[in-house]
Image: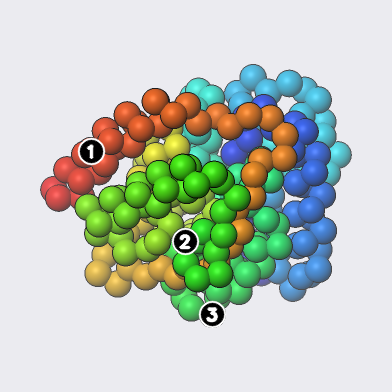
């Protein structure tokens, strides 16, 4: 039976994981015809109580390497994909991505045969609880990335996606910040070639439940500009 992996980067998200993991397990338990592997990619010096929490839920806690960046979390997730996995889902640990959308992503991936299915904030039916300023910044960022990199989806920057495992298992990433999401998307597009396909389904992005966002605005902007230039040059070669 094909395995569907759920990779959840989590940096100091103990309180949110206490809520999120039971919700995910409850959701996937309703679909016993599917086999899931849930992995939480924790910091490389994660406190033991977080690992104990995951162990109590029979969920894998994997320490990210080589550092605690978001990019390392995504790369660690890719490096630990099973050869038996058919699809891989990435989603955030802060409660902004809804477990109820997991099966929607899986069903759409199976039905459409697309390389990537994206849980989108910015298509009809999608929604975000971010402020108007953050929403405007995000939409502008997505339009710029989509246009310059030739990726025609509305929500390039969301981490909530399902991928065909064979397309991402051996991909090597270099970005360390949240721009790694765009790097992964572009590299899947290039690897898939002219037959690359994606589908967007509407999703509701909610505010994080506990804690503060890890995104620092100045670093975020500078990093994305540098990444945009780097990926544009890379994709042109």
Q: Earlier in the sequence, mark 3 or mark 2?
A: 3
Q: Secondary structure at mark 2?
A: loop
Residue 54's place in the image compared with 186, above or below, is above
> How many numbered circles does the render carry?
3
Q: Position of residue 203 (x, y in %)?
A: 58, 62
| Residue 110 against residue 85 in the figure, above or below | below
- Front label number (3 vs 2): 2
> Which residue is under mark 3?
111
Mark found first going from the N terminus, 1 or 3: 3
Of 25 and 4, the residue lying toward us = 25
Q: Is 70 placed left or right of 44 in the picture?
A: left
Determine whether the residue tagged by mark 1 lies in a helix, strand or loop.
helix
Q: Is residue 2 above or below residue 90?
A: below
User: Which residue is at 40% across, 61% downward?
Assistant: 154
Frontmost of labels 1 and 3 is 1
Q: Which mark is residue 122?
A: 2
Counting from the top left corner in percent of width and height, residue 90 is at: 56, 50
Disc on res. 230: 1
């Amino acid at each position: 039976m094909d395995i569907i992996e759920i990779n959840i980067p989590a940096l100091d998200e103990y309180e949110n994981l206490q809520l999120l993991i039971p919700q995910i397990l409850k959701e996937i338990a309703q679909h016993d015809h599917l086999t899931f592997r849930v992995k939480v990619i924790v910091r490389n010096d994660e406190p033991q109580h977080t690992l104990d929490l995951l162990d109590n839920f029979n969920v894998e806690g994997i320490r990210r390497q080589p550092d605690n960046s978001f990019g390392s979390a995504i790369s660690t997730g890719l490096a630990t994909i099973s050869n038996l996995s058919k699809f891989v889902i990435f989603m955030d640990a802060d409660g902004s991505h809804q477990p109820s959308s997991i099966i929607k992503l899986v069903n759409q991936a199976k039905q459409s045969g697309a390389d990537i299915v994206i849980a989108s904030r910015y298509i009809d039916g999608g929604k975000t609880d971010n402020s108007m300023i953050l929403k405007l910044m995000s939409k502008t960022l997505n339009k710029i990335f989509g246009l310059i990199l030739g990726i025609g989806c509305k929500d390039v920057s969301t981490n909530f996606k399902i991928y065909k495992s064979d397309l991402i298992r051996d991909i090597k990433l270099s970005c360390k910040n949240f721009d790694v999401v765009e790097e992964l998307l572009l590299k899947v597009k290039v690897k898939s070639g002219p037959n690359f396909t994606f589908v967007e389904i509407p999703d509701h992005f909610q505010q994080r439940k506990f804690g503060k966002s890890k995104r620092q605005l100045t670093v975020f902007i500078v990093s994305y500009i540098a990444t945009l230039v780097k990926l544009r040059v890379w994709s042109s070669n």
